[in-house]
Amino acid sequence: MGKLQCVEWLRETELLYWGDLDAAGFQIVNQLRGYFPNLQTFLMDKATLNALPDYHVDAPRSPVARLENLTEEELCPI
């Protein structure tokens, strides 16, 4: 993550994140939200996933077991 977590003004602004709908994408959300609790995701939900079936790919299972900074919807997007 580097020094991004040290940028104080980011804690006081609206932060939007759009990333891959896979384990790695949600791990990034979890890490970022640990620094910036105000972070909101968009287009990372079940409706988006279901709307784009041609882009689904198989991915390996993630060894990360706990993502305590995710919302209920983010924890179960499928």
Image (cartoon, rainbow, N blue to C red):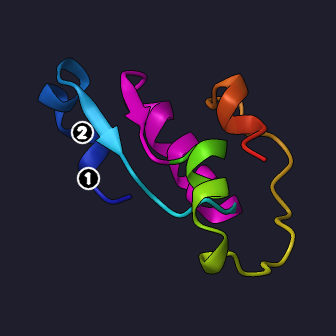
The percent position of residue 3, horizontal first and vertical second, equals 26, 52
Q: Is residue 6 above or below residue 61?
A: above
The percent position of residue 73, horizontal first and vertical second, equals 68, 29
The percent position of residue 40, horizontal first and vertical second, equals 40, 31
64 to the left or right of 47: right
Local secondary structure at mark 1: loop
Residue found at the far left of this picture = 9
The amino acid at mark 2 is Cys
Instruction: Identify the residue at horizontal 12%, vertical 27% (top origin).
Output: 9
Q: Nearer the viewer, residue 9 or 14?
A: 14
The amino acid at mark 1 is Lys
Residue 57 is a magenta residue: no
Local secondary structure at mark 2: helix
Q: Quadrant of the N terminus?
A: bottom left
Q: Is residue 11 above or below residue 50?
A: above
56 to the left or right of 29: right
Which class describes the residues within 10 Å of circle 2: few (<14), some (14-19), or many (20+)?
Answer: few
70 to the left or right of 60: left
Instruction: Identify the residue at horizontal 74%, vertical 37% (top origin).
Output: 75
Which range of residues does the magenta coloring cover? Answer: 23-43
Q: Nearer the viewer, residue 41 or 43?
A: 43
Image mark count: 2
Residue 33 is a magenta residue: yes
Check residue 6 in the rendering and tell me which mark sits there, or answer none. Answer: 2
Instruction: Identify the residue at horizontal 38%, vertical 30% (top origin).
Output: 39
Main secondary structure type of the part rendered in magenta = helix
Q: Marks 1 and 2: CB-CB under 8 Å?
A: yes
Q: CA distance from mark 1 to mark 2?
A: 5 Å
Residue topped by disc 1: 3
Check residue 74 in the rendering and tell me which mark sits there, or answer none. Answer: none
Which class describes the residues within 10 Å of circle 1: few (<14), some (14-19), or many (20+)?
Answer: few
The percent position of residue 67, horizontal first and vertical second, equals 72, 39
